[in-house]
Amino acid sequence: MQYIKLICSLVGLLIGFQSLAAIHYVGEGSQCNGTNHHDSLGIALLSAAFNGSENDEIRLTNTVAYLGNGDGSYTLTGWNSSGAGNLTIKGGYANCGDPRNDVNPVIGNTNSAVFDIKGDSVVTLINISIFGSASRGIIISENSDVFLEEVDVSSNVAGIRVLGGSYLEVGASTVVHNNGDLSGISKGGGIWCYGNNSEVRIEGLLAANKAQSGGNMYIEDGCFAVLEGGSQIKGSRELAQMDAESGGGIMVHDGGELLANGGANRVIISDHWANFGGGLYVWGSGRATLFNTYIARNRAFDQISGGSGIYAINGGSSAAQVIMDRVASCPFLISCSEFEQNQFEGSVVYINNSKVKISRTIFEQNEYIAPDGAFRGMIDTQNGAVLEMSYSNMISNEAYFLLVNYAQVEMSHITAVNNSYNDSNIGSGDSFVWYTPLGNTRIENSIWQDTQGGDTRGAGQVSGKCNLIDDSSDWPIGSYTLGAAIFNNVAGGDARQQASSDGVDMCQQDTFAWSTDRDIEYQVSPVNENTNPQGNPGEAGGLYDAGFDEVYDNIGPDEFLLTVQREGSGEGFVISDPLGISCGTNCTEVVFNGTLMTLTATPFTGSDFIGWRGCPLVNGSNQCLISVTESVTTYAEFQPDDLIFSDGFE
């Protein structure tokens, strides 16, 4: 019967295709009687294909079933502006002509992919469930672009495959979940992406997908994947199930690249179980950049390496394989980039023959669960690894060693407090900072409270300067000052110093070429805090605070804070001479007492610069001259160039 209907439809199309509408319905019943109403999705696709290059939208009603090999599997080829037109398939209609509702049709139960999209197609799927394929739910190839909006991809043998220069966008309300398994699917139970110029952009949720590698997502060989702010990669921990052997959340393999682009909403990678790399596993020439990313409640079972949060291997030491940092746009004061409540038997971060940079990141309440006497480290570097770590906080973790280093580690502006271990063989105590039997560990401008020094043996070397510590055991002479840091609220997770703390204005600049002068709050460092003498205790003339946060309570007589704020509904930017402010992105700068700063305001196209407020000397139409002798805020107003003011004039 399906073939008879198809032939009749083709005959009708050949006779009167010029009159067909761009909107097509699939449905049966008294309401589905127009020329653009069809009995099945297959016939609707044929009808749309004869509509020339005009874009087509097919609306699926719930009066028709879309299941089985005859009605649940579709190959879409050549749906683009030079072919059959871009295609939208949209579900959630109770009947033909009815408004949309919340009951989405289920398409699937097929031997092959539910949608095999190829041939430069541009396809949008909205309000549908893709279910029960014995293959991938969706395959996207041959430079095709696919957009998923409020789509549920679940219970397929595997989720989505993207290859051949194609693009996939997973919208904020789309869920890809419960696809794949640990034995039959080798890569990416949720999404597997590869091939030059292939790209995946995730705004929604990947959850409880499984594979041998990359349970939720596998990225390799020319694929670029972006996790937008608010996206979630979530594992099967609540079900007490493994997500993958390696890379429970995400595997980034040779040639793949991952960008976690968390902004005002963090990217979340959480609740995965794997043997290696619970949250994220990065291999070889794969690269991962994580901005404003929350890695939490993951677990790695391997007792030697583990890497419950991040596992980085074989990337070499010349360029960073993994970068983790916060950026300015974050709704939280300090908890923008974070490892929290990960369980580890080997480590939370494992680095082997790779380079990793971790900045402005918090390690909090991570838990050591290996058998007693194993004595692993929360961070573990091996075999030529390089770790560069700055402006980060280790607070309330359970770990025997905070760092195990067989390679090269440089740490600057770290605050470690309230970290401890509990072992039935030897009891409990404060965590040790390092175990360095090989390699070099250098630590500068940091605070180590409630800790013991560490264990250095063999060819291992530990050095440093300007560290505020409360236990001098094992610390090299000249690397520390004994003192007591005063924190805001350690029990509540806030280990920022108060102005009266010994670690304020304690240090000179660190010696690391890679370091930057922005603290955990993304404030410029140093700032002269007026309540403490410079370098007492610490280094003479110190301005930098030890630890991960720069205190801004009472700026002293040597330096002041210049701030620019933009006002109005227009757009523009302000730069300073001498350089320092580019607002835009950096709207504050610490400057020495008496410095003459020239601020220049430039509107964007479509806007006008109206004027300055709080500027002591205006120069010309767009410049403000300020001799900085105190902390000051200046306001630059931008308005749209077609704005009509209250007096009726522009």
Image (cartoon, rainbow, N blue to C red):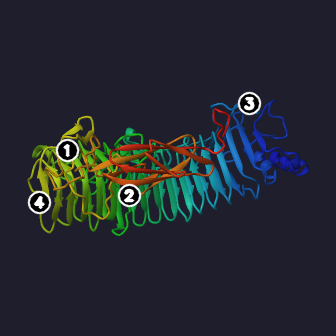
The residue pinned by badge 4 equals: 478
Q: CA distance from mark 3 to mark 4?
A: 78 Å
Estimate how packed mark 4 is, as few (under 14), some (14 to 19) or many (20 or more) residues with alpha carbons within 10 Å.
few
The residue pinned by badge 3 equals: 98
Q: Earlier in the sequence, mark 3 or mark 1?
A: 3
The residue pinned by badge 2 equals: 323
Q: Which mark is residue 419?
A: 1
Point out the frontmost of discs 2 and 4.
4
Task: Check disc 2 and report its element: helix, strand or loop.
Answer: strand
* Amino acid bearing label 4: Gly
Where is 300 relative to 438, above or below?
above
Q: CA distance from mark 2 to mark 4?
A: 31 Å
Which quadrant is home to the C terminus? Answer: top right
Foreground residue among 21 and 73: 21
Residue 134 in view: no
Q: CA distance from mark 2 to mark 3?
A: 50 Å
Say if mark 2 contacts mark 4, CB within 8 Å: no
Most distant residue in the right direction: 15
Residue at coordinates 9% horizontally, 60% vertically from top-left?
477
Q: CA distance from mark 3 to mark 1?
A: 61 Å
* Amino acid bearing label 1: Asn
* Amino acid bearing label 2: Ile
